[in-house]
Amino acid sequence: MPVASERLVGWLSPKWLVGGVAVAACALLASYDVRLGMAAGTLLGVAVLMWLYVALRYGSMSGTPSVRTALVERSRQQAANRVLAARASGAQAGADPAEGA
C-alpha cells in the first residue's frame, strides 16, 4: 500500500530538505566566491520559479484534485473488497462441508 504524501506535513516534506540543502550550498559558494555564489543563486532562483510555475499550473497548488489521491482511494477500496470476498467465501465453505465430499 503506498504511503500518502499528504501525511507529510510542514517541514517534514522532502522538498523542504532539498531546498534547505540548496540554500546552504549557495551560502557556502557565496562565502567562497561572491560571483560564484551569485551564479548559483541565480540558478537556484530559476529552479524555484520553474517549480512554482509547474506547481501552480499542474500540481497540488492548482486546485484540481490529485490523480494520486484517487488512485490510493481506489486501491484501498479494492483491498476492502478482497477482504469481504475472502470472508464471504470462507463463510460459504464453512456452511457447506458436505459439498466438498
Image: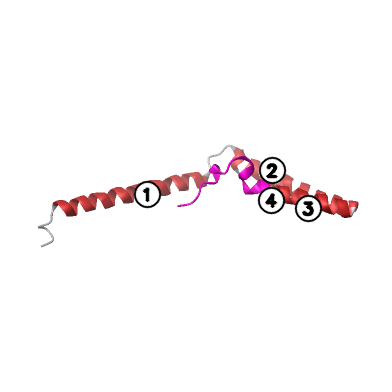
Neighbourhood count class around disc 4 (C-alpha, 10 Å): few under 14, some 14–19, many 20 upward: few
How far apart marks 4 and 1 lie (CA) works out to: 35 Å
Residue projecting furthest to the top: 63
According to the picture, the residue beneath numbered tag 3 turns out to be 25
Q: Nearer the viewer, residue 95 or 39?
A: 95
Magenta segment, which residues?
Answer: 1-18
Question: Which color scheme is applied?
Answer: secondary structure
Q: Which residue is rendered at x = 33% and y = 48% of the image?
A: 81
Q: Which residue is rendered at x = 84% and y = 54% of the image?
A: 29
According to the picture, the residue beneath numbered tag 2 turns out to be 52
* Amino acid identity at mark 1: Gln
Neighbourhood count class around disc 3 (C-alpha, 10 Å): few under 14, some 14–19, many 20 upward: some
* Amino acid identity at mark 4: Val
How far apart marks 3 and 4 lie (CA) works out to: 11 Å
According to the picture, the residue beneath numbered tag 4 turns out to be 18
**Is residue 17 in the magenta section?**
yes
The main secondary structure of the magenta stretch is helix
